[in-house]
Image (cartoon, rainbow, N blue to C red):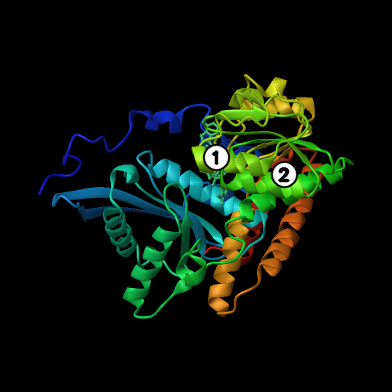
Amino acid sequence: MTSPNTASSRPIIRPDKDHFLSEENPFEAMMSRFDYAAQKLNLDAGLYKLLRNPEKQITVSIPVPRDNGELEVYTGYRVLYNTSRGPAKGGIRFDLNVNLDEVTALAAWMTWKCAIVNIPFGGAKGGVICDPAEMSATEIERLTRRYTSSIIEILGPDSDVPAPDVNTNERVMAWIMDTYSMHKRHTVTAVVTGKPISLGGSLGRREATGRGCMFMTREALRRHGMPIEGARIAVQGFGNVGSVAARLLQQQGARIVAISDKSGGVYNEKGLDLDAAQAHIKTNRLLAGFTGGDAITNDELLKVPCEVLLPAALENVITSKNARDVQARIICEGANGPTTANADRILDEKGVFVIPDILANAGGVTVSYFEWVQDRGGYFWDEETVNSRLERIMVKAFDEVTGMADKYTTSNRIGAYMLAIERVAEVHRLRGIYA
Ligand code: NAD
């Protein structure tokens, strides 16, 4: 047996983890926006303190026998940020960059997101510091099962319901569900969401975030009196969220003029053939080399002439350096944290209508909620029902967020935080503080 972290010279924590604490850090930016919104709402000082702190933070050591016989010990976290509105909801990530501050901030983020779409969940997040790319499937399974059993007291359909996140997927969710069920001595599908369909997953879950982005873009265009037919849209990141949003928007009549992935982008003012792009990616794994338009960089994509810009790749892409060059009238934030706080100010001045991430990409958690409801009811909906209920919830949230922003003459982002804070604070006021 070897001692922790020394089984080989593999680094357990990357040197770049301090990125989390940097000025442009999206989580720090999120909490500063929370502070601003709380101030604008004149939130009571006691409630402010309550909402600024996580309810519960759990750290666990996870011993895992490696395939080569060595024992490795990983560190895992689960943070329940606020459960006043219902069971905690939030993903689990397996990544070398996981740390407790980040997990806590992401759990707070989930709290606000669930409140904005008004689903009866609190916010949580979990993570294990590991590099799944250098682990075998059986090692990942052992890690998942041991982590699950280490936090089993807090898990449950009524208390804490995980979901997939960075480097975890429906396979991992199935292992969590199985481990939990073995402990309970009966099958409990509602303990996690994002499961395979045959195991209690929901139809429409895979497409839900992109579909939500489509609804939000449509509503924003409508608000500006701009027809969706022919609207030029640039999508950064042609993965799960970006590709689904692009296709659905194209089906609505929009013109997708630019798409990209990590290998670069492509621009065609006449509109791109998305089937051809998808086929190219299927064969070549990356978009690079696709000849359906002119090659552009990811930074150039943000500045192309268009009505809507839909960043759906990663955080911190719209910054003070490029925000002035954005030509879009509307930005729909499919990714989490794509816009820095400095860029926000510039976009505000330019009058760009930003649909903030905590609203724009909340379609995923909304259909996760549907999955939990279906599992608990033991009755499964057809895809049309899932999609139409998603639409109703997202459109209502859009109206409420923009209504809040209009009422307080502020940005949609601050309006969204104000709506979320008000909803969580209201529940605390009604419930009172158990002493
Ligand atoms: P994904 O891995 O399926 O796709 C990511 C895309 O971004 C890929 O096309 C990838 O090539 C591209 N990309 C990666 N690095 C890039 C770079 N440096 N420059 C440009 N493009 C790059 O991921 P996804 O599930 O589509 O998630 C995208 C974003 O949406 C993330 O910020 C994620 O947190 C957020 N999000 C996803 C969901 C969901 O349900 N999938 C829900 C809420 C938020």
Q: Amino acid type of disc 2?
A: Gly
Rounded to the nearest whole Å, what is the CA distance between mark 2 and mark 1? 38 Å
Residue drawn at (41%, 65%), measured in percent from left and top? 174
Which image quarter: residue 334? top right
Q: Which residue is mark 1?
A: 281
Residue 7 located left or right of residue 179: left
Tell me if residue 108 can be seen: yes
Residue drawn at (56%, 34%), measured in percent from left and top? 287
Q: Secondary structure at mark 2?
A: helix
Q: Which residue is mark 2?
A: 415
Residue 148: x %, y % from top left: 34, 62
Q: Residues within 10 Å of mark 1 (few under 14, many from 20)?
A: some
Which mark is in front, 2 or 1?
1
Q: Amino acid type of disc 1?
A: Ile
Residue 159: x %, y % from top left: 47, 67
Residue 67 located left or right of residue 326: left
Residue drawn at (57%, 47%), measured in percent from left and top? 240
Q: Secondary structure at mark 1?
A: helix
Identify the mark nearer the N-term, 2 or 1: 1
